[in-house]
Image: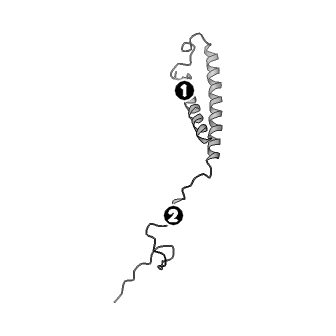
Amino acid sequence: MTTVLLILHLFVTLALIAVVLVQRSEGGGLGIGTSQGMGSFMSGRGTANLLTRTTAVLGTVFFILSLTLALMSRGTSVRPSVLDSPPAGQVAPGAPAAPGGLPAAPRVPTN
């Protein structure tokens, strides 16, 4: 189920990117969203409304899919935390250890 949602999420993401790039921005953008780029299919205003609504729908679907995938993958991690693993220089079982799990430091004789 997660794989299907991930693939759907990928397609929605690519469609959202394409629709945003097609829209005409204040600076002109790619300019594909103008009435000249769409031919005589729709007027400039109709094209802008269609692209704006499509962006809103794709953005909503993207947001819902993101939340769904996050909730589905919550708690499925099998890797323990780095803090839960024993230290690299752990003392063999039965040997006395210093507090905190570290081996006791050797005593240096003093004169």
Residue at which label 2 appears: 85
Of residues 26 and 49, the one nearer the viewer is 49
- Could you tell me residue 36's position as x and y percent? 54, 12
- Of circles 1 and 2, which is in front? 2
Seen in the image, is 86 located left or right of residue 47? Answer: left
Residue reaching furthest to the top: 40
Of residues 14 and 75, the one nearer the viewer is 75
| Total numbered badges shown on the rendered structure | 2
- Could you tell me residue 90's position as x and y percent? 46, 71
Q: Is residue 53 above or below residue 66?
A: above
Q: Along the polypeptide, which appears first: circle 1 or circle 2?
A: 1
Residue 34: image quadrant is top right
Of residues 64 and 94, the one nearer the viewer is 94
Residue at which label 1 appears: 18
* Secondary structure of residue under mark 2: loop
Which amino acid type corresponds to the residue marked 1 in the rendered image?
Answer: Ala
Q: Residue at x 61, y 42 (%)?
A: 2
Image quadrant in which the N terminus is located:
top right
- Label 2 CA crowd tier, 10 Å (few <14, some 14–19, many 20+): few
Which amino acid type corresponds to the residue marked 2 in the rendered image?
Answer: Ser
Residue reaching furthest to the left: 111
- Could you tell me residue 109's position as x and y percent? 36, 86
- Label 1 CA crowd tier, 10 Å (few <14, some 14–19, many 20+): few
* Secondary structure of residue under mark 1: helix
Q: Residue at x 58, y 29 (%)?
A: 16
Mark-to-mark CA distance, 1 and 2 = 45 Å
Q: Residue at x 60, y 12 (%)?
A: 41
Q: Are marks 1 and 2 in contact (CB under 8 Å)?
A: no
